[in-house]
Amino acid sequence: MLIEPISSGFTVGVTRADCITSRAYGANVSDSPKPTLLSLAVAFANIGLTSVGGAGGPLRYVIVKQRRWLSEGALAELFGVAQALPGATAVNIAVMFSDRAVGPLGPLAALFGLIVPSLVIAIGLAGIATQLAAVNVRFAAAEVAVTAAVAGIFISNGLRVIAQLWSETPDLQAVWRCARVAIAALGIVMVAGFHVFIPLTMLVLLALSMLLEWRVYNILTSTMPPRHPDPSTSSGEGPTLSDIDESQA
């Protein structure tokens, strides 16, 4: 079990900046052994079992410091590309890195280590929790309390996103800002109220969001004042290269 200070990677909510910091670790990748299918599975199992609130820290610890497979800069590049792609960042990094290092079978080994051990433990704990909740009233109450705490975290994050959506365009009419918030509320109603299939809900919300943002973009661009070119930079009136050379001489 990897338990170390933040500087070595085990922390909650690690950001991309934590993976780009160059002074914490230096990895001499020239003398590091080449990854194998087994070492990839073990390494990413370590990452999957020690990631809490994000895999940025454990990824950096295992790949850069422990295994020395990548340098800080190479991991930062992978991290940036992985965050731009759909899906979980850790999964994207596992696929890209293992495919480069081992070949077509590398992603299978890396994803197996990243997902399967954590999944087995989660299923086992869920089964134990279900049995304990059925026979122990106190445990059932504790389970409800944990669920309420997690729900509170999601609600606070949702309120924070709503506040950001409302304040990022202060010049936009309130009706359009309310429409942004209404799309998020529609997702909650569709899933929690009508039990609509989540992928279908995401497609509906994506289509509505694209239509809304297209309309908002048109409104914002139509209200922007026209940009007039600077007369000093127009052809025949601004300084030429020869003028600049003469002034520098």
Image (cartoon, rainbow, N blue to C red):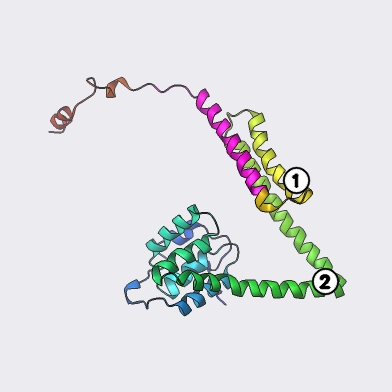
Most common secondary structure along the magenta stretch: helix
- Pinpoint residue 151: horizontal percent, then vertical percent: 73, 56
Nearest to the observer: residue 193 or residue 13: 193
For residue 4, say whether it is visible: no
**Position of 236 relative to 184 (above/below):** above
Q: Which mark is residue 189?
A: 1
Disc 2 marks a residue whose amino acid type is Ala
179 vs 237, nearest the viewer: 179
- In the picture, measured across the screen, residue 176 lies left or right of residue 22, that is right
Which span is picked out in magenta? Answer: 201-228
Circle nearer the N terminus (1, 2): 2
Label 1 SS: helix
Image spot of residue 42 (x, y percent): 51, 77
Instruction: Identify the residue shown where x is 67% and y is 43%.
Output: 184
Give the residue number, with chain letter if any, for mark 2: 133
Disc 2, SS: helix
Is 92 inside the magenta-drawn segment? no
Q: Position of residue 129 (x, y in %)?
A: 77, 72
Q: In percent of the image, x 47 and y 22: which residue is there?
A: 225
- Nearest-to-viewer mark from 1 and 2: 1
206 in magenta? yes
Q: Which residue type does callout 1 highlight?
A: Val
Residue name at image x 42 percent, y 63 percent: 75
